[in-house]
Image: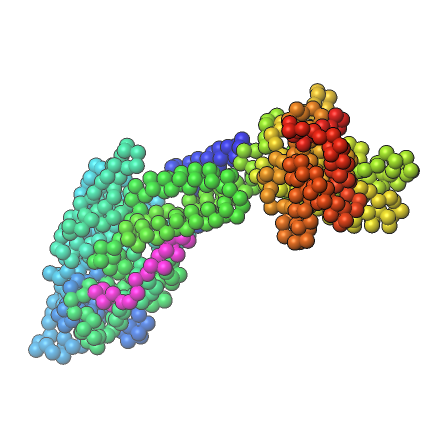
Amino acid sequence: MKQRRIRTLLGIILTLLLLLPVIQDNRPALLQRFEYDLYDMRLKYFVKPGLDLRIVIVDVDEKSLAEQGRWPWNRAKLAQLLDQLFDHYGVAIAGFDMVFSEADNSIDLNQLTAMLLEGQSTPDLTTLLQQLNPDRQLAAAIRDRPVVLGYAFDRSDRELLEGDPGIAAIQSHPMLDQQSIPRAKGIIASVDALQSQQSYSGFFDNPMVDADGVYRRVPMLQRYQGQYYPSLSLAMWLALFEERQAVPEFEADLFGEHEALVAINAAGQPIPVDRSGAVLVPYRGGQGSFPYISATDVITGEADPVLLKGVIVLIGTSAAGLLDLRVTPVSSRYPGVEVHANILSGLLDDRIASEPDYTLGVEILQILVSGILLSILIPRSSVMFSTVITLVWASCLIAFNLYAWQSLLWVIPLGYTLFLVLSLYLFQQTTGYFFEARNIKLLTGQFGHYIPPEVVQELSRQEEGVHLRGENRDMTVFFSDIRGFTQISEQLPPQQLTRMMNIYLTEMTHIIHQQRGTVDKYIGDAVMAFWGAPLQDEEHAKHGLDTALEMLSQLPQLNRRLVAAGLPEVKIGMGLHSGTMSVGNMGSEFRMAYTVMGDAVNLASRLEGLTKFYGCPLLVTGELYTRLPGYIYRRIDCARVKGRSEPVELFQPMAAIGAGGTELFEQVQLFNQGVELYRERQWVAASNRFQQWLDIYPEDRVAELYLKRITQLQSNDPGEGWDAVFSHQQK
């Protein structure tokens, strides 16, 4: 019990030590990578199948480059692209996942030729250049249309880049200033000729790529010059509903010390974010989760109008040479434009998963519960059961986590908790092994010479442990002795006598151990053993009697071995009794022994001595006879033994019922009838029964004793007060 408490305490200490990095938000890199992997697995498992037809990507792909020329295109082409999208196809909104940071001074020769051929007179050069200016044409195409331009913030220490990011989604906000929102030092924005025409614009860079280079989260806001500007997806969401401002939402953090950013309310819909204003990208699946239409097909009017009518359009690039590919949980080569498309899709479905501050409390709670639960249960369970407990608990954690992911849109960290569960299991099993090995070594030193190894193993697993102090227990005690041992020892040389005793005691001890008995001591040729200690044994009486009967059954084979070795045969007498006796480590300061004492022990010793008088190999008391009715017993006598005033019923167990056969049962019944008739003073009838018994077993000493007593009693009537008790004055 003490060792289990120690293991429980160590498990709780280990739990608290592993909990510190979670509270301090300083997890080891390897465990953080494991958490990333678990996140990616859940994301892939719950991907939403099918295309989202509400969002279409107009793609500057390899086909577009082949037909329209190398990138960057003259912006007159992009103006033509926008005119087609809104005027011909009727899209709802368009966003550029690209930036036009430099003026376009090129001239579209095809457009120039067309103007010259169609014009009635040659325009002056200034007017011609203004009409052919690509930026002016693109600006005209953007004007009064829901078009969102993209730009990129810069956070390097180089000379600051300046530009106009458009209108901020949130003006300066004191509480927002306390959050860990990314801060930009510069900006790469579109030229003023374009930016001034459009109120909506958003950044497409991601300063929050995870340590392994994977796009799992994207900031919805970045701080620049004291104001907060929206991402491309957030700007498109605001533009879709003709909203200009977003509203941050805060809640008290886990410890109630600070207000933490939990959401950004845009167009009446709260978008769950973390303290950094980042959203977990709700990937629908791998590349191609949205319809792709080649940009050249839109320009030439060959695109399917059904796909574009009333949809949200993102204009981006997937051509390999344009380097807009990202590493994501669903693909290692994923077009960056689809990242924004997935966020917009999640906003439309209101299925943005979140990892707000209260999930930290949930994680701490599941770590504490896991640590305390396993620290209590594993030390008190077997290896198999503790393995089952660990697997079941881990399964429950995973099931709850998946339920929270799918139904509640909670992203609860799981990796650290599973690591703790595995660590506790291995730690508890390892410490349990060393404690058990120590226990077995200690117990082997205490009991190894007296009880079988498997009982030592079982003792080491006892819930209450093992103590050696004295106590009273209901037990069974056994004594055996070799008949005529003094004469045998006088006839044999010491070496042969030693060999004979080693063979005999080894075989007898083996039988005792088979029946879970404890060898108390060897006293010359005598053996003392008991059942019911140190290990509790509810069937100690049965085990003791089975041991004695097995010894008798194995004695002929043992004698054949002795004869083959040139040694004499042996006969044994055994006494067996069940009752309350004292057991414990007893002795002096100089020597201690784990043994039993008490009246019940003395009585068993008397029984072993009486086997010589009655000529029976085994005697038991009426107490054991009453406890074990499933055996054939011969009723031997009712006797008063030395040291006891109360008479004792004596029985000779012959065999288990069914093992001795019908004939033996009937024969024993014949003898027992003789004893009953004897006690009823029916001398003639009793003599007939005993004589019939002697006809079967002519050398039986008990029947001869009864016939002798009957002869004496017939000549000297004992009277009505006779109790049929025979008194033994000596052992």
Q: Nearer the viewer, residue 441 or 474?
A: 474
Q: Residue at x 39, y 37 (%)?
A: 24
Residue at the outermost left position = 120
Q: Nearer the viewer, residue 491 or 650?
A: 650
* Above/below status of 554 relative to 20: below
In the rendered image, residue 690, in percent from the top left (x then y), is placed at 73, 43
In the rendered image, residue 232, in percent from the top left (x then y), is placed at 24, 55
* Above/below status of 437 relative to 149: above
Can residue 206 be seen here? The reply is: no
In the rendered image, residue 449, in percent from the top left (x then y), is placed at 71, 36
Location of residue 128 (image quadrant): bottom left
In the rendered image, residue 688, in percent from the top left (x then y), is placed at 72, 45
Q: Nearer the viewer, residue 140 or 549?
A: 549
Is 40 in the magenta? Answer: yes
Q: How is the image coloured?
A: rainbow
Can residue 677 be seen here? The reply is: yes
Q: Residue at x 25, y 44 (%)?
A: 262
Is 551 in the magenta? Answer: no
- Taking the image as shown, residue 147 lies to the left or right of residue 387, namely left
Residue at the outermost top position = 589
Q: Residue at x 22, y 37 (%)?
A: 175
* Above/below status of 277 relative to 43: above
Residue at the outermost bottom position = 117
| Magenta stretch in the rendered image | 35-58
